[in-house]
Amino acid sequence: MGGIAIKGCGKGIPRYSLHNRDLEEFLDTSHDWIVSRTGIEERRVAAPDEDNVSLSLLACGQALERAGVEGRDVDLIVVATATPDRMVPSLACTLQRELGSRGPALDINAGCSGFIYALAIAFHLMRGGIATRALVVGTETLTRIVDWRDRSTCVIFGDGAGAALLAPCPEGEGIIAASLDALGEGDGLIRAEGGGARMMASLAGGLVPGNHLLPSPLPHLHRTWNGIDPFLRMDGKEVFKFAVNKLCATVKELCSAAGVGTEEVSLIIPHQANLRILAAAAERLGVPKESFFTNIQRYGNTSAASIPIALEEALRAGMIREGDLVILAGFGAGMTWGGALLRWQDGQAIEGGRTA
Ligand code: ACO
């Protein structure tokens, strides 16, 4: 049986950037607090004419082009998102229509671990002979579900999409180990009740503003429906501890499964949640903090989109070369976590970088 590799990556980034200084205008916060506690300087916010479909199509278009694959040659699409544009049908089916692809298409929700879950699902379906070329997408419009009056959450999240095209490669290259796990007891740590079937009425009542870009007037009225709070809420401290633990455990587990030492891994591309989480994980693993790729400074936490966007940027910066061992690792709502260890394969060209 052959292997499965990422042959091309792409990203779709909203046009509008909201800097910490913009948040100071309407929130009791400061640029210095946000940078010192999270590392975030700015985040992208989807404009009214942007959504997960448009951002994902940008990401998929780049991934396909860089892999030299046509949309019609894709026979599996797996989309990870916690903020789908609508409940039914799946975003994956809409992407399939737009790209002229075929085969199975599905959305999954595993919070910020979503891209890792989607990657593992596509990998195993391909290994099982169900598909030969897959698009794996992570996309979010989180700024539409945060409470812009809640400084403990709204400063953290941003919007965006990332995609990877998977295709066959020689055995022993590409994805060489993957791990997934979840702990349902933590389902209250990160949650958003709005938008589900229990809370549709609240959304119809106008919780999501026409122009959510502008903080004035404050975009969300504080409204609940049947006593349920619709916004994204998070127990930041608990999530922080969980994230450091699971990130370290995932890196160790993948290295042990592949029989390699952590020092042999060239680059770890983690979910971009907080620079302090990454610094703590690096210290605990005994690796330099430069082992972790970061771009949270510019995008904030884009949940399922953060790993593919970071991967695209690491590739474009020439930080990944043929034969490198690369770990992708995520953790998030659910609580969920997981990772993948890849031996990077050449021939995945990207402009401005060495491989993609
Ligand atoms: N600006 C200024 N002050 C703030 C802000 C803000 N934006 N937010 C909170 N504070 C205040 C608090 O009110 C508190 O004040 P007090 O001491 O007077 O009560 C003080 O700062 C400290 O608050 P903490 O919550 O203890 O701050 P902490 O250092 O824990 O940082 C943070 C909060 C950044 C959220 C951190 O806990 C974190 O990053 N957690 C992990 C989040 C994460 O990884 N999420 C990923 C998963 S998301 C998903 O899956 C969708």
Image (cartoon, rainbow, N blue to C red):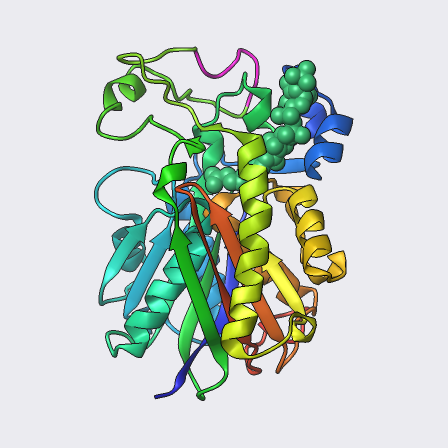
Judging depth in this view, the residue of 167 and 58 nearest the camera is 167
How would you classify the magenta stretch by its main secondary structure? Answer: loop
Residue 220 magenta-highlighted: yes
Q: Looking at the image, in which quadrant does ligand 1 appear?
A: top right
Where residue 16 sits: x, y (%)? 58, 36
The residue depicted at 32 percent of the width and 55 percent of the height is 95
Where residue 162 sits: x, y (%)? 49, 55
Judging depth in this view, the residue of 238 and 71 nearest the camera is 238
| Left or right of residue 333, residue 241 in this image | right
The residue depicted at 58 percent of the width and 40 percent of the height is 241
Place residue 149 in its image quadrant: top right
Where residue 42 sits: x, y (%)? 67, 36
Q: Is residue 44 visible?
A: no
Where residue 320 sits: x, y (%)? 65, 72
Q: Which residues are magenta?
A: 214-221
| Left or right of residue 223, residue 33 in this image | right
Q: Quadrant of the N terminus?
A: bottom left
